[in-house]
């Protein structure tokens, strides 16, 4: 299945590469922006417990 995905991306339709870029940009957006509040709360809790 992985082989078919890679093959379709490079040798298939143009839509395959557009899908890869779309998913990659969504992952970067989630990691950089949407996860920041959750990571901030976890970091604050961990730091507070460590100091106490």
Image: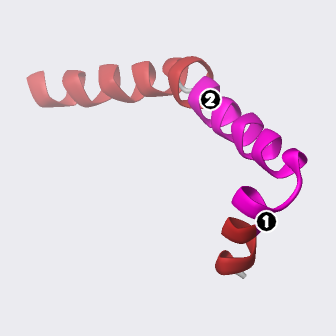
- The residue drawn where x is 62% and y is 29% is 30
Residue that numbered label 2 is attached to = 30
Residue 23: image quadrant is top right
- The residue drawn where x is 70% and y is 58% is 10
Find residue 24 and name its label.
Answer: none
Along the viewing direction, whichever of 29 and 11 lies nearer the viewer:
11
Overall secondary structure of the magenta section:
helix
Location of the N terminus by quadrant is: bottom right
* Residue 10 part of the magenta-drawn span: yes
Residue found at the very far left of the displayed protein: 51
Along the viewing direction, whichever of 46 and 10 lies nearer the viewer:
10
**On screen, 15 above or below 8?**
above
* Residue 17 part of the magenta-drawn span: yes
* Mark 1 element type: helix
Residue that numbered label 1 is attached to = 8
Residue 14 appears in view: yes
Viewed as shown, does residue 12 lie left or right of 24? right
- Whole-Å distance between the Cαs marked 2 and 1? 25 Å
Q: Which residues are magenta?
A: 8-29
């Amino acid at each position: 299945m992985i082989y078919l995905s890679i093959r379709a991306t490079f040798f298939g339709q143009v839509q395959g590469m557009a899908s890869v870029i779309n998913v990659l940009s969504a992952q970067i957006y989630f990691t950089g922006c949407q996860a920041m509040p959750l990571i901030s709360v976890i970091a604050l809790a961990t730091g507070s417990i460590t100091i106490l």
